Image: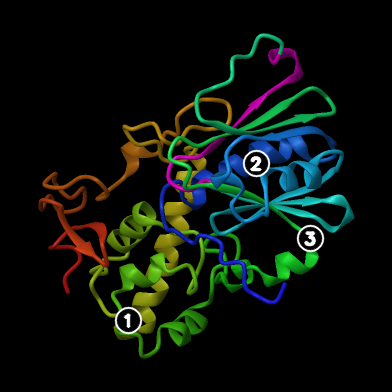
Amino acid sequence: MGTVIRLSMEASLPELPEVEITRRHLEKAMVGRKLQSVRVTHDRTARYNTTTDEIESRLSGRQVDSVGRRGKFLVVGLNDGYTMVAHLGMSGRFSIASGTDTANLEEAPHTHFVAILDDGAEISFIDPRTFGFIAVFDEDELADSNLSRLGPDAWLDPPSVPTLMKTLKGRTAPIKALLLDQRPMAGLGNIYADEALHLARIHPRTPGGDLDATEVARLLVAIRRVLSEAIDCGGTTLDDLAYLLPDGQAGDNLGRLGVYARTDEPCLRCGTPVQRIVIRARSTHFCPRCQRL
């Protein structure tokens, strides 16, 4: 194609744990199944393809070979060399209804994508704010996308301490901003970056290049822990219910959060009121006592 397909890399909710839970549901429902019919009803959902018709024609009749994840992207491998890439954006979620449940199923508002599988199951993408997308690429288009520019996955394949130190060397940007960048490592957004920095006792404004090996090691352990715990709890559903699991249930991780969205509430470690600041236009929550600059 000659030009890079610049997919949105927004570090928003849903984040890695929510996308991983979604992936597991989709994998169970879709792998080995054929996409019998596909309908795309919103141009923004299809904005990385030429038209909605292109997505429908590229998906219809193809078999799903795999459902993977790269950072916050869902990557669905299809036969004949095609790949479906999906991003949930700010408010997107997938819904799965089995064949026995679809006869009287009422389509949810803001449903912009529906795929019927060969066993009658229905996969829907619901996205009120349309920041999310679904794209279908051939091998050349996928190679031309910036998906390959993502850093190592923060949960599946996190960088080693020396590798991350090398990446951060000389960087003056705040570590919070670097964690949201998706190039040092992929998958973190506002919630889990705040939580990991709190657990690691690192101030979010600390320049990335100032972290020593001990701090980087502590940060990597913290990232692994907060992501694993969130996945075990089904992800984080905030009060706006923007994220729900594909079975319609809410994630149960909200009550485990130590600092995110807890401005003026006591730090669970020391009791100091949690503060909120803005770093690179993103709300950031931290404990001024546990996370000294």
Q: Is residue 47 left or right of residue 272?
A: right
Q: Can residue 223 be found in the magenta stretch?
A: no
Q: CA distance from mark 1 to mark 3?
A: 41 Å
Report the residue marked by disc 2: 24
User: Magenta stretch?
Assistant: 88-102
- Say what amino acid the circle numbered 2 marks: Arg
Given contact means CB atoms under 8 Å apart, are the residues at marks 2 and 3 in contact? no
Q: Residue at x 80, y 55 (%)?
A: 82
Dot 2: within a 10 Å radius of its alpha carbon, few (fewer than 14), some, or many (20 or more) residues? some
Report the residue marked by disc 3: 138
Residue 43 horizontal/vertical position (percent):
58, 44
Q: Is residue 116 left or right of residue 94?
A: right
Q: Give the residue at the far bottom of this rendering.
A: 170
Q: Quadrant of the C terminus?
A: bottom left
> In this rendering, which labeled residue sits more in front, label 2 or label 1?
2
Q: Is residue 103 left or right of residue 213?
A: right
Q: Residue at x 13, y 62 (%)?
A: 288
Q: Is residue 290 left or right of residue 161?
A: left
Which type of secondary structure does the marked residue at label 3 adopt? loop
Given contact means CB atoms under 8 Å apart, are the residues at marks 2 and 1 in contact? no
Q: Quadrant of the N terminus?
A: bottom right
Q: Residue at x 33, y 69 (%)?
A: 177
Residue 190 horizontal/vertical position (percent):
35, 55
Q: Earlier in the sequence, mark 2 or mark 3?
A: 2
Q: CA distance from mark 2 to mark 1?
A: 35 Å
Task: Using the image, tell me which numbered label, if any, was put on residue 211.
Answer: 1
- Identify which residue, 285 or 40, lies in the foreground: 40
Dot 3: within a 10 Å radius of its alpha carbon, few (fewer than 14), some, or many (20 or more) residues? some
- Identify which residue, 114 or 19, lies in the foreground: 114
